Image (cartoon, rainbow, N blue to C red):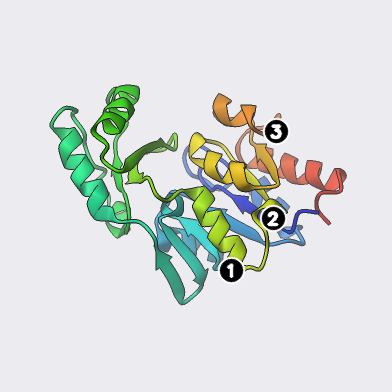
Amino acid sequence: MIKALAVDIDGTLTDMNRVLCPASLQAMRGLKVPVILSTGNTHCFSRTVSILLGTPRIFIAENGGVLSYSDGVMEVLADQRICEAAFQRLSEEFALKKYESSRHKYRFTDVIVKNDFDLPALVRRAEELELGVEIVDSAFAVHIKDRRVNKGTGLAKIAQHMNLDPVEFAAIGDSMSDQPMFARAGFRASVGNASPGLKEISDYVAKKDFGEGFAEIVDYMIGEGLLP
C-alpha cells in the first residue's frame, strides 16, 4: 500500500502554460494519503502552491536543493556558489542567458538558463570540466544544479522526516528531472506528455496528458488497490 505521493508540479499538475488543470485538483481532493510536492521551483513558489492545493508544507523544491519540513522549517542542501562558478565557466564557451524574471531571484541553490543552445554539448562539456554540477532540463527551463542533490535525495530525507520508507511513496512526474525520485519510490507513474526516458522507467504511463493524466494515474492506483 502506498502511503504518500511525491508529485511534480509543472507539466504534471499543470499544462505547458503552468495553468493548474482542474482534474488534478479534483483528484487530490479525494486522496486519503498526503501529496508531497517535488519540483524545480523555488521554495516560496512551492509553499504558495501547497497552500492553494491544500497539500502539506512538507515539500521538495529546487530539484532537491531546498526541503521544507513544516511552515517554519526549511533546509538548504546545495551550494549555489558552485552553480554560479559553473555558469561563468560554461559561459566562456556557450551563449548562456539567465532567466531574469523576479521569481528566479528567490532561488537558493541553482542557476536557471534559457534553453536556446546546444544542450547535449553543454552537458558533455560540464562533465568534462568536472564542475560539480548537473545540467537538468525540466522542459520548462534548464537548471545548473549542485550534482550532490536531486529529487531522489530530497525524497529520502522527506521520507525519513515522515517516518516512512521511500518505497512507500509513489512518484509521479513528466521529465527526466523526476528520474532520481523514480529510482527510490515504490511505484512510478508518468503523465502522457512525459519524456520518453521517464516513460521507460514507469510502472504506469497515463494515456492522458498533464493534470488529466495525473487524475488517471490516481484512478488507476485506487483501482489496483495501491491507494486506500
- Is residue 83 visible to us here? yes
Q: Among all residues in the image, which is located at the extreme bottom?
A: 72
Q: Earlier in the sequence, mark 2 or mark 1?
A: 2
Q: Earlier in the sequence, mark 3 or mark 2?
A: 2
Which element carries disc 2, helix, strand or loop? helix
Measuring from the top left, give residue 209's x and y in whole percent: 63, 33
Does residue 176 sit above or below 40 in this rendering? Answer: above
Mark seen at residue 28: 2
Mark seen at residue 206: 3
Q: Residue at x 48, y 66 (%)?
A: 68
- Is residue 143 visible to us here? no
Left or right of 156 in this view: 122: left
Check disc 1 and report the residue beneath it. 161
Q: Among all residues in the image, which is located at the extreme left?
A: 92
The foreground one among 112 and 157 is 157
Mark 3: amino acid: Ala
